[in-house]
Amino acid sequence: MNPYQLILKKRNGGEHTPEEIRELVLGFANDQGIETYQMAAWLMAVWFKGMTVPELSALTQAMVDSGDQIDLSSLPGVKVDKHSTGGVGDTTTLILAPLAAAAGATVAKMSGRGLGHTGGTLDKLESVPGLRTDLTSQQFLDQVRRIGVAVISQTGNLVPADGKMYSLRDVTATVDSIPLIASSVMSKKIACGAEVILLDVKYGRGAFMENLADARELARRMVDLGKALGRRVRAVISDMDQPLGTMIGNALEVQEAIEILRNERPGSALEVVSVELAAHLLEMAGVSENLERARVRVRELIQNGEGLRKLGEMFRAQGGDPRVVEDTSLLPQAPIIEPVPSPSSGFVTGIHAQQIGFAGTALGAGRKRKGDPIDPAVGIIMEHRVGDAVEAGQPLAVVHARDRQTLAEARQILLDSIAIGPDRPAPRKLIEEIVE
Ligand code: URA
Ligand code: CA
């Protein structure tokens, strides 16, 4: 079939054969017979008509086949991976990766950078003095074999079709299509080689999916897709209406992860979600025989300091200063630290996660454009969560800033995005549901 007929078929609601999908994806990725405008038209047809389960599997497989795949088969143990659809104060990777490795799972993980209001694990890690995330494939595999864990930036030419298709979606109003998001995320996870994949699908005002129904559908499609392509996959749907952690900013988020692994923040939202995610990984990997035992094991590894020790080992292996896990004052520090007092008394009724992320970006903790530099030291410490009582004049947050101008900007965004009212709101669950 020629490209015109493929576009017409999807536009009219027809179902593609796997061969047709391969022809489209690989033709576009390799500049062989599919022009950019034709792919753009096809993506829009998919936006309107959706994709069947077999079509989506074929799309994802073709995207994986457009580039290299990481071969983890030489590594011992069950290879586990976790992916979050992105959020604010979402530092779970830095907590669960060392915990899962300390428990005996194999964590060979490639992470991303922050963009827009969301943070990225690589940026956070690189705030540790000396730490590198640009390992070669060989260094990556050697490190995982030696200590059970590595978190690095993408190596090799993984899923080039996704890079090309995503850039096109970005400028043609076709990013927000559940099948296109599902294939984009899962193609990258499949190419990274893990046998067990846990998806943390966020919903709320700081997430890609604002409402629960959309998050549920995205989770369902990604889980089905992973299974169709031979992986053990599960998704948790978790709250991202307010920031997950207390700290937002790169060095600050590393500090919070360390404090949790030192057992200094028991019961905090970030700890609860990290423990739960780590437990799911251990149960899925068969390291623990059931979820309850896995939770007990993970809490043990926090209490006995094994998780913290593993994080220090990972820092050292990647060239970072391992003393940071004992002394977080070795992390970059901002010159200006000032509280933002509450303008009134009452209850915190809402904290707009995306806006808090933008306050971080205004300070220099995040990027407005791909490739922008970031400031590792700056950020925000939230003093309250939704439902807390506050008094006028007491701090709502503490801002860590580089200069007065960005401090003022962040302060204004914070005041606009933390709502205070007379009634205590009903709490939202941290983890809404599990999709298998
Ligand atoms: N994240 C991705 O990796 N791909 C998408 O399409 C959307 C979010
Ligand atoms: Ca993240």
Image (cartoon, rainbow, N blue to C red):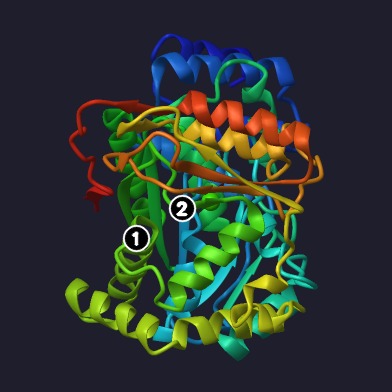
Marks 1 and 2 close (CB-CB < 8 Å): yes
Please identify the quarter of the rendering in which residue 388 is found. Answer: top left
SS under mark 2: loop
Identify the residue at horizontal 60%, vertical 32% (top origin). 411
**Residue closest to the eye, 82 or 260:** 260
Please identify the quarter of the rendering in which residue 4 is found. Answer: top right
* Side of 45 relative to 300 (left or right): right
Q: Position of residue 402 (x, y in %)?
A: 77, 45
- Distance, label 1 to label 2, CA atoms, is 9 Å
Identify the residue at horizontal 57%, vertical 66% (top origin). 255
SS under mark 1: loop
Q: Name the residue type under label 2.
A: Thr
Indicate whether 85 appears above or below 258.
Answer: above
The N terminus - image quarter: top right
* Neighbour tally class for label 1: few under 14, some 14-19, many 20 plus, Cα within 10 Å: some
Q: Name the residue type under label 1.
A: Ser
Q: How many marks?
A: 2
Residue 17 visible in the picture: no
Q: Position of residue 29 (x, y in %)?
A: 71, 37
Task: Read off the residue under disc 2.
Answer: 246
* Side of 23 relative to 243 (left or right): right
| Precedes in sequence: disc 1 or disc 2 | 2
**Residue closest to the eye, 176 or 89:** 89
Q: Is mark 2 within 8 Å of ligand 2?
A: no
**Residue closest to the eye, 183 or 82:** 82
Identify the residue at horizontal 76%, vertical 53% (top origin). 335
Q: Position of residue 122 (x, y in %)?
A: 67, 58
Task: Read off the residue under disc 1.
Answer: 268
* Neighbour tally class for label 2: few under 14, some 14-19, many 20 plus, Cα within 10 Å: many
Indicate whether 117 appears above or below 133.
Answer: above
**Residue closest to the eye, 355 or 120:** 355
* Side of 324 relative to 83 (left or right): right
